[in-house]
Amino acid sequence: MATELRLYCDGATGGTPTQGAVGYRLLDGSGEVLLEHAQPIGDATSNEAEYRALILGLSSCQHYTRARIHCFTDSELMVRQIREEYRVTDPRLQQLAARVHRLAQQFRRVSFSHVRCTDPEMARAGRLATEALRVASP
């Protein structure tokens, strides 16, 4: 089992009604890609899509390690909410944030960081989400 993983996750939304999709990449400590995943998630706001990408990515991490996870996303709002720097006021997002915290307890240490969407790994996660959204939208 790996001792450290990096998770890059992104959500995407579009269309009418608004549809969502998620994409994430899981890398080991040396930067080798262990997993790429993308899927449509149905009706979702952009914030819900970001949270659901993180939830699905953290769930996948359980198959590789219970040690350290470094989570990266381009959603500064979500990072600040997960770190409890900002309050989560929306009831649906409160439930998703609670799921993230429960999942994080399954690992020795989990960190959450904001990165720009131009970061190469983040950009790839964003493309995965966008491609899944395109497939889901007629």
Image (spheres, rainbow, N blue to C red):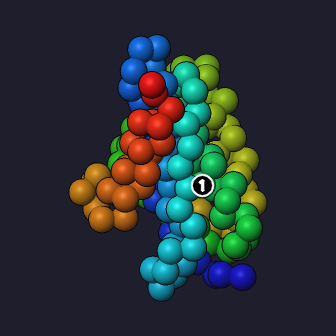
The residue positioned farthest toward the bottom in the image shown = 30
Q: Can residue 103 be seen at all in this image of the molecule?
A: yes
Residue at 61 percent of width and 23 percent of height: 92
> 34 and 111: which one is in front?
34
Does residue 92 sit above or below 125 in this rendering? Answer: above
Res 131 quadrant in image: top left
- Give the residue pinned by disc 1: 57
Does the image show residue 49?
no
Residue sitting at x 74%, y 67%: 63
The N terminus, quarter of image: bottom right
| Mark 1, other Cα within 10 Å: few <14 / some 14–19 / many ≥20 | many
- Front residue of 69/133: it is 133
Q: Position of residue 50 (x, y in %)?
A: 48, 39
Indicate the position of residue 98 as horizontal and vertical percent values: 67, 38
- Residue 122: x and y, percent? 36, 58
- Of residue 51 and residue 134, the one placed in the foreground of this image is 134
